[in-house]
Image: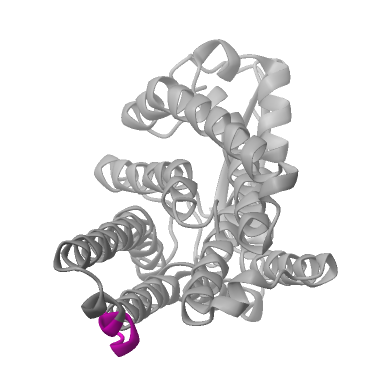
C-alpha cells in the first residue's frame, strides 16, 4: 500500500461523472426541498382527525416513506460537493455507510411502489363497493399490511446490502481514504483481484436483481395498468347504469343534460389522472429496470463508459422525480373519500 501517494481533487471525487455531479449538486436540492415540504404539508392534512380513514392512512404511510427516501438520497447528493468529498471525516462516514444507505434507499423505493399498489387496490374496491369505502380498518390490520410490505421489500432489496465488496485504502500518510466497490455477482474483478464469493452467493445476487426488476418495476407497471383500467370501466358502468339513466330521464331535459355533462367530466378527469399515474410510473421507473437488466447482462462488471454511467444516473434521478409527484396523483381522489 503506497500510503505516501496523494490523490488530486479530481481523483477524490465521490460522484461518477460530471453529469451525475451536476444532477445531485444543482437539481437534487430543489427537488429535495419541494418533496420534503410537500409531503409535510400533505401529512398535516392527512393526519388531521377529520381526515383519518383507511385510504388516507395509506397515503400517510406513503408520504412518510417518500420523505425517508429523500433523506436517504441526501448523503449521495452531499458527496458531490468538493469541500465534503475531500473532507476526511465525511469520506470516512460516507464510504463506510454507502452500501447501507443504498440498501435503505432501494428498500424505501420498493416499499413506496407496493404502497402505491395498495392504494390503487383500495380505490378500486371502494368504487366497486360503496359500503367498503365507508368501512374503516382496525389499526392492527393496517399495521400488519404495512409491516408485510416493508418485510417483503426489505428481503427483496437486501442484495444491495451485501451484493458489493469494497476495498478501502488509506493514502497520503493516512490523510486520504479511497474506496472502490465490485459486485459479487461479477465473475472477475479488475486489477487481477479474485472474487472470493461462492458460485451460490453470486447466483443468489443475480436472481435477486432479476426478482427486483420483475417485482418492483415490471409487475407494478402491469398491475397499475390493469387496476386503473378496471377503475375506469367501473366508473363508466356506474355512469351508464340503467337506474341512473332512469333517474336522469325523469328529470327535466336541462337538468339531465347538465348531470350527464358532469358525469362525463368526472370520467374524463379520472381518465386523465389514471394516464398520468401510469405514464409517470412507466417513464420514471421503467428506465431503472432496463439499466439493471443491462448491467446484469454485461456480467455485473463496473462500467467504464461515461455514456452508460450517465444513463444510469439519469434513470436513478427519474425515480426521485416519481416520488415527489406520486402522492399528488394518488391523493386527488382519496383525501376526501
Q: Position of residue 260 (x, y in %)?
A: 21, 67
Q: Residue at x 29, y 76 (%)?
A: 239
Q: Residue at x 20, y 60 (%)?
A: 258
Q: Is residue 294 left or right of residue 157?
A: left
Q: Is residue 204 visible?
A: no
Residue 247, placed above or below residue 62: below
Magenta-tinted stretch: 240-246
27 or 196, which is in the foreground?
A: 27
Q: Position of residue 27 (x, y in %)?
A: 38, 25
Judge whether 314 appears above or below 4 on screen: below
Which residue is the extreme one toward the right? 140
Query: Residue 170: which quarter of the image?
Result: top right
Question: Is 241 contained in the magenta span?
Answer: yes
Q: Position of residue 61 (x, y in %)?
A: 67, 53
Colour setting = one colour
Q: Quadrant of the N terminus?
A: top right
Amino acid at each position: 500500500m503506497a500510503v505516501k501517494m496523494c490523490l488530486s481533487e479530481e481523483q477524490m471525487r465521490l460522484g461518477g461523472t460530471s453529469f451525475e455531479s451536476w444532477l445531485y449538486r444543482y437539481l437534487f436540492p430543489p427537488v429535495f426541498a419541494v418533496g420534503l415540504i410537500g409531503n409535510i404539508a400533505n401529512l398535516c392534512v392527512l393526519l388531521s382527525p377529520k381526515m383519518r380513514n383507511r385510504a388516507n392512512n395509506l397515503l400517510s404511510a406513503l408520504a412518510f416513506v417518500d420523505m425517508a427516501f429523500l433523506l436517504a438520497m441526501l448523503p449521495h447528493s452531499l458527496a458531490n460537493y468538493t469541500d465534503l468529498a475531500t473532507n476526511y471525516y465525511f469520506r470516512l462516514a460516507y464510504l463506510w455507510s454507502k452500501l447501507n444507505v443504498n440498501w435503505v434507499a432501494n428498500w424505501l423505493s420498493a416499499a413506496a411502489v407496493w404502497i402505491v399498489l395498495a392504494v390503487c387496490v383500495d380505490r378500486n374496491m371502494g368504487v366497486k363497493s360503496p359500503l367498503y369505502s365507508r368501512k374503516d380498518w382496525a389499526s392492527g390490520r393496517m399495521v400488519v399490511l404495512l409491516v408485510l410490505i416493508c418485510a417483503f421489500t426489505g428481503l427483496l432489496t437486501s442484495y444491495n446490502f451485501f451484493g458489493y465488496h469494497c476495498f478501502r485504502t488509506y493514502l497520503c500518510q493516512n490523510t486520504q481514504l479511497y474506496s472502490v466497490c465490485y459486485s459479487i455477482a461479477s465473475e472477475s474483478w479488475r486489477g487481477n483481484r479474485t472474487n472470493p464469493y461462492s458460485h451460490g452467493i453470486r447466483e443468489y445476487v443475480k436472481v435477486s436483481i432479476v426478482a427486483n426488476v420483475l417485482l418492483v418495476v415490471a409487475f407494478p407497471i402491469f398491475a397499475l395498468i390493469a387496476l386503473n383500467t378496471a377503475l375506469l370501466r367501473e366508473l363508466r358502468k356506474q355512469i351508464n347504469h340503467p337506474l341512473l339513466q332512469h333517474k336522469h330521464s325523469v328529470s327535466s331535459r336541462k337538468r339531465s343534460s347538465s348531470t350527464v355533462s358532469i358525469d362525463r367530466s368526472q370520467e374524463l378527469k379520472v381518465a386523465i389522472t389514471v394516464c398520468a399515474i401510469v405514464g409517470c410510473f412507466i417513464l420514471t421507473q421503467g428506465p431503472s429496470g432496463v439499466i439493471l437488466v443491462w448491467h446484469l447482462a454485461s456480467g455485473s462488471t463496473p462500467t467504464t463508459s461515461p455514456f452508460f454511467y450517465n444513463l444510469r444516473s439519469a434513470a436513478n434521478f427519474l425515480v426521485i422525480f416519481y416520488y415527489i409527484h406520486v402522492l399528488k396523483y394518488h391523493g386527488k381522489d382519496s383525501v376526501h373519500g
